[in-house]
Amino acid sequence: MSKQAKPLSIIYNKKSGFHAANKDEVYEELVRLLSEYDYEIQSFELGQESSFEELISKVLERHQDQNNVGIVVAAGGDGTLNAVAQRLMHSNIPMGIFPLGTFNYVARVLNIPLDLIDAAKVIATGENRKVHVAQINDYIYLNNASLGLYPLFIQKREHYNQKFGRFPLHAYTSGLDVLIRDRKELKLEIEVDHQIYPVKTPLIFFGNNQLQLADLNLQIAKDAAEGKVAGVVVAKSDKRTLFKILWQLIRGNIDKAPDVYSFAADQVAIHSKRKKMTVAIDGEIVTMQPPLNISVQKNALNVRVPHDSASV
């Protein structure tokens, strides 16, 4: 009797370069490799349906057999991983990763290879590992969420990327541009485990990925690893202070920057008199209505990782 094929669905972002004409040979090798492990593969391009909900519904139809759920693979950067993860949370369907972003922090913290062929081998032969997922109102973030200057950094970075190509240097170039042109201050109340602190700040940053936080030499990296809300708040918004912060950020020593405070908690809420707030979530810009409630759902997502991989 022949072995039943396992469904494998690849959700990819064409903008990331996956399935591009110059990568046809790589894609064919991925399909060949995964097929050898009895996977029945189907690819779904983001945007091919009228909405993501319609697309993900078609994907999940392939994974309803509880005795043969298979795997759903996200091929792209943070935005693609985030969208897929939000629909796979609290299910027994594991998420595989083809890392195609700029920094690929989620893949790196889980020791998933950045080479696509090696990543496919992990999908085929690895194990499932539960990871923490942070949430801000109705949105999740695997890496970070932020308010203030950081969303402006993202918008400027995308402008540079579209004009000059996608390079890590543009994150810093866009940061300088924002500091020179677009400094703004938020007047907020931050509720940390039910204690309220009034603040005026140009930037609040929440991190869920301990590798990213460790790269910044932030002590709260260990708190994020334990499933805490890990946050950073900047207490001054004058240009001199902000340039010092950017310099320390570039050097990876943000904890040594002036007027930067980090904290960890089980729950955080941000209160504002504004009707709407702009938030950057894993590189995507969204608008939310306050209060903003931030928490971490522990062990909420199954991810296919190498054996003995670290956990988010």
Image (spheres, helix red, strand yellow):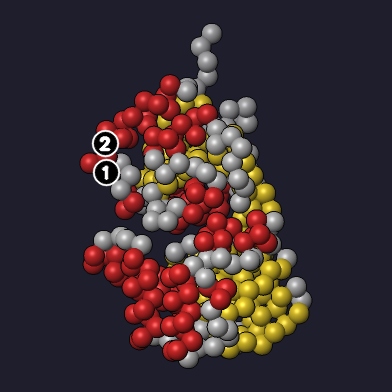
Name the secondary structure under disc 2: helix
Quadrant of the image occupied by residue 265: bottom right
**Residue in front for this viewpoint, 22 or 232:** 232
Image spot of residue 299 (x, y percent):
67, 49
- On residue 225, the disc is none
Distance between the alpha carbons at the discs numbered 2 and 1: 7 Å
**Residue in front for this viewpoint, 56 or 111:** 111
Image spot of residue 301 (x, y percent):
61, 47
Q: In this view, does 250 lie to the left or right of 260?
A: left
Q: What residue type is labelled 2?
A: Asp
- Up the image or down, 129 lies above or below 32; here it is below
Image spot of residue 181 (x, y percent):
35, 86
Identify the residue at horizontal 62%, vertical 27% (top origin): 67
- Up the image or down, 201 lies above or below 155; here it is below
Identify the residue at horizontal 66%, vertical 59% (top origin): 222
Q: Is residue 9 left or right of residue 181?
A: right
Image spot of residue 258 (x, y percent):
55, 83
Around disc 2, counting alpha carbons within 10 Å, would you say few (fewer than 14), some (14 to 19), or many (20 or more)?
few
Residue 213 visible to an observer of this rendering: yes
Name the secondary structure under disc 1: loop
Asked if the residues shown at circle 2 and circle 1 are in contact, with their CB atoms under 8 angstroms apart, the answer is: yes
Quick one: quadrant of the N terminus?
A: top right
Q: Mark 1 sits on what residue?
A: 20
Quadrant of the image occupied by residue 126: top right
Q: Mark 2 sits on what residue?
A: 24
Identify the residue at horizontal 42%, vertical 56% (top origin): 103
